[in-house]
Image: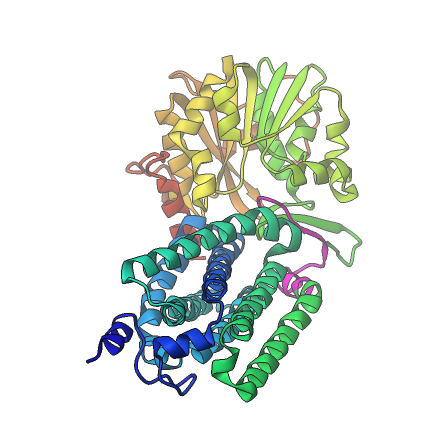
Amino acid sequence: MSSTAQDDHLDGTTDSEPDGATEDTATTRQHRYRRPGMARFAVLLAVFVCSACGLVYELALVALGSYLIGNSVGQASIVLSLMVFAMGLGALLAKPLQRWAAVSFVAVELVLALLGGLSVLGLYAAFAWLSMYMPMLIVTSLVLGTLIGAEIPLLMVLLQRIRRQEAGSAVADMFAADYVGALLGGLAFPFLLLPLLGQVQGALLVGMLNAAAGLGLILTVYRVELGKRLVVLLTASVVLIGGVLGGAFALSDRFETTARQALYDDPVVHAERSKYQEIVITSSKSLSGRTDTRLFLNGDLQFSSVDERRYHEALVHPAMVGDHSEVLILGGGDGLALREVLRYPDVERVTLVELDPAVLRLGREDPRLTSLNEHAFDDPRVNTVSADAFSWLRDNRRRYDTVLVDMPDPDSTETAKLYSTEFYSLVRRSMAEGARVNVQAGSPYFAPKAYWCVEASMRQAGLATVPYSRPIPSFGQWGFQLGASGDSAPSPRLPEEVPELRTLDERTLRAATVFPPDRDRIADIEPSTLMHPRIVRYERGAWRNY
């Protein structure tokens, strides 16, 4: 083997060069790449752009699963592990394609651009109409991962054709561009694409950029090798794929509206995707003329106007016994629990801590919500804080006479911390002497282990509890945990000065503390903590059966 041929063998090229059909010697390379420095820069720029696009696809799949299914840790684990595995598979499958590296790279980029750009749209459709989200997510992750994995080997061959380089140096240059591109894609998705375009349009735009990057490299560096006919064919393919993605981009709003409506029984009258969640309000009217307004967060029902008073009266009033001058509400950004608190004229100050400013805005401004909460946020006694309740409690030094915890169900790792022993310890620290706390604790019928886990976590935090439940037609049998500091559990009763209630009195409250034998306290339930969020397992395992 000659020294030139040996060098070509080591750097990943061969004496035979199908893309150009010429011998790949130093002389012919110099003829092809008259400006090798610019050519290498173009290849590394393609690595940079492709890496950024690939990471956006990964993050888009993770984010979509978090919105639709919840459990962002589980979704991230599924997507990332499958895609990393598939990337290794794609690298192996790319080995025979290295003989036609230039045209193979463009073909991979075109397929990746089309499938990656349409991935979010397709998965949303599978979730809305086909009930096949998880199988489609697995297939999509494997296909996209395989295509992404094929990029680097092909680009490495293209880079080495321009100028022979030691393997370590070539890998260093390639991975430097790859990792910096990943940094850009990782930052662009949550801070630019998601807030400005949303998931569907963001993925489509990245798909168009992906296709353009592949074609741009061929037109600027490898056009001579491919020949005019192949360049024209590839260019036409990019235009066609760009047209498909552009058409999907133009129709994406209509598609998203139609798909979203398929997820809800009643007409959607308001929908937005905030920084934290998807917020949907539906409204329907029965034959008798009664309006049913419903609020959903990430697809989970928060209330129905038909029976929300059953829930909020049961949550608020048993906790208002004794002094209630200072009230703290954690969650409840719709203002309905706040409405019940403000019915007591001797309440001097209410602090409401809600994570999502968009929910607070709707509670203040949306006429459907303001008619239900009776414009509670306009009361001068109310102070609202947009913050994570856990973090806010850590910094809080004020003491409250009544604390109401009205949080979303603990079906994800994000909400699990709001049902942990550590969280209830912070709640206890914020309670004045003789104060009461009431926590919405889920369904003792549908999710009994999760319900009793809330009690176990509160007790471990030093709160004595009284569990009780009430029938809420839109939810089912729903439970609460009334607590107080110390060893003596609070008595289940209503305040002497309680306003007129529609759905609750002393008799029904006492009866609410009685549970049937098959749903009574479960002795071996362990508390949920930050390091061991057991309540998520209890919650998911229960609802999966209904």
**Side of 244 where 61 appears, left or right:** left
Tell me where residue 27 sits by quadrant.
bottom left
Residue 125 seen in the current view: no
**Side of 276 where 147 appears, left or right:** left
Position above or below: 296 against 165: above
For the point 36% across and 34% down, which residue is it? Answer: 529
**Side of 214 where 339 appears, left or right:** right
Residue 34 seen in the current view: yes
- Highlighted range, magenta: 256-281
**Side of 45 where 99 appears, left or right:** left
Residue 51: % across, % down: 46, 59
Near-viewer residue (540 or 503) = 540
Near-viewer residue (1 or 419) = 1
Q: Residue furthest top?
A: 433
Residue 48: % across, % down: 48, 58
Residue 464: % across, % down: 41, 22
Tell me where residue 416 sits by quadrant.
top left
For the point 46% across and 17% down, which residue is it? Answer: 429
User: What count of labels does the image hold?
Assistant: 0
